[in-house]
Image (cartoon, rainbow, N blue to C red):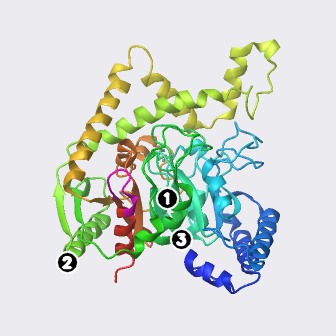
Amino acid sequence: MFTFSNIRNYQDFLRTSQDGCLLAVEHYLSVIDDKKGLNAFLEVYDREALQRARELDSKRNSGKGMGKLHGVVVSLKDVIAYKGHKLSAASKILGNFVSIYNATAVERLLQEDAIIIGRNNCDEFAMGSTNENSAYGPTLNARDPQKVPGGSSGGSAVAVQAGMCMVSLGSDTGGSVRQPADFCGIQGLKPSYGKVSRYGLIAYASSFDQIGIFAISTEDIGIVLEVIAGSDGQDSSYSNKAQEEYSLAILQEPLKFRVAYFREALEHSSLDPEIRKACYGLVQRLKNAGHQVEPIDFEYLDYIVPAYYVLSTAEASSNLSRYDGIRYGYRSPQVVKEVGLTEFYKSTRSEGFGEEVKRRILLGTFVLSAGYQDAYFTRAQKIRKLLINRNELIFNQFDILISPTSPSTAFKIGEKTEDPISMYLADIYTVYANLTGIPAISLPLFTHTNGMPFGIQAMTNRFKEVFLLQFSQQLTNPG
Ligand code: GLN
């Protein structure tokens, strides 16, 4: 039977196997089929994936070498463009839209011989924390199907959690890779803003959005990051900082880190006491291992979720204006000539978007409107600037900032759907990294007495991914 531990071992196995890629794909297709009740995939590219596996097997057998991701079976969140394949952002409004180009990240996966096995369910337009906002039904947590997998990249997280693929790409605007990784007990990295090209990623809030990686080991995250990061003329927000060999981060000598945590974050009233206790336990463990760990005061904690929701919905209201029924996907059955263009737009958008997306477009339009802009949008921008300045000071003194990833373990399905504010507030620990553009990773370290996994989040200064991966490796594979 096929088993997967990490990419390196898998590729060692391929070197001695004539049909290893095919075995891997057949294995994953059967797991996907067995677990289709979890609703992690919106579409499975079974025939294509089998075909690609055969091609890669024969390429390898004929001595033509192996790309860095040779045979690696990957799934994509349904917001990442894959040429010739449907792309719906789990929304009705994109209908049967088919992408006409590859996202840069996808192009690079393919160049390095990856196998794309399917597209994953998610919250509509990546807005949500539970995957319940999908137009195609919720994804269920494989650990406990009564619970949500987190969101918005819930399908990607479950695909890796339940062994339906080796790694998955998601997107993270306010926590959508890290929080589902936390709820599902796997690792999830949001790279620095400007590290991975956003070309071909459906825009939610462009100054926050980043493609992120789900995997079961830090090493695999490093290998995939090395492939998908890198300069790209198609994304002007991409940083031209030199590329590093992330996959080597884990081979470095163990380091002693200067670690900080926000005192207010660990004392916050919304934090589950068991998670708090585990975090303090970790602080002690890090100290015992010779790292310097210190609490720091952070008086802005209660401002970051409001600032994030003001700025991200403002950007979303503008980004989503392109879905008008004329250019893409779903069109209202109304006839423009009869009802007029404005009425046509209204019905298309009312019928095509789900509740949460509409709520955010309204909120974003409101915070940008004349008379309210200064009170909301401009203020939120000022808060963002304060955070960025503060962040610089923190990382002058420290290497790593740790916090919980989420204040609780996975919610029950339906538990928070009637209370969007409480759902938003649960983003308290993840949005800081998006507001400041720094990289952050969620690491599964613990199991709650309620049976669900949880972990911690580690962050570092912008473009210091190597550091972050070294820290993660030390924490998840001590000794
Ligand atoms: N939960 C956050 C939100 O709903 C995260 C979204 C994301 O990162 N895409 O906005």
Residue located at (78% from left, 77% from top): 62
In the image, is 44 to the left or to the right of 286?
Answer: right
Q: Position of residue 414 (x, y in %)?
A: 53, 52
Residue type pointed to by label 2:
Asn
Q: Is residue 325 magenta?
A: no
Dominant SS of magenta comes to: loop
Viewer-closest of 59 and 142? 59
Viewer-closest of 2 and 69? 69
Element assignment for label 2: helix
Q: Position of residue 2 (x, y in %)?
A: 67, 83
Q: Nearer the viewer, mark 1 or mark 3?
A: 1
Residue located at (24% from left, 52% from top): 395
Tell me: is circle 3 under 8 Å from ligand 1. no
Residue type pointed to by label 1:
Pro
Compared with residue 41, is residue 348 higher up or lower down, i.e. above or below?
Answer: above
Q: Which residue is mark 2?
A: 288
Compared with residue 373, is residue 49 higher up or lower down, i.e. above or below?
Answer: below
Q: Position of residue 353 (x, y in %)?
A: 64, 35
Q: Is residue 6 visible?
A: no
Compared with residue 390, is residue 181 higher up or lower down, i.e. above or below?
Answer: below
Which corner quadrant of the image does residue 146 belong to?
bottom right
Viewer-closest of 206 and 443? 206
Q: Which residue is mark 3?
A: 143
Instruction: Tell which circle, 1 or 3, labels the residue nearer the N-terminal end.
Output: 3
The residue segment tinted magenta is 459-466
Tell me: is circle 2 under 8 Å from ligand 1. no
Which corner quadrant of the image does residue 357 belong to?
top right
Q: Nearer the viewer, mark 2 or mark 3?
A: 2
Q: Which residue is mark 1?
A: 180
Real-space Cα separation, disc 2 to disc 1, in angstroms? 30 Å
Q: Is residue 464 magenta?
A: yes
Instruction: Tell which circle, 2 or 1, labels the residue nearer the N-terminal end.
Output: 1
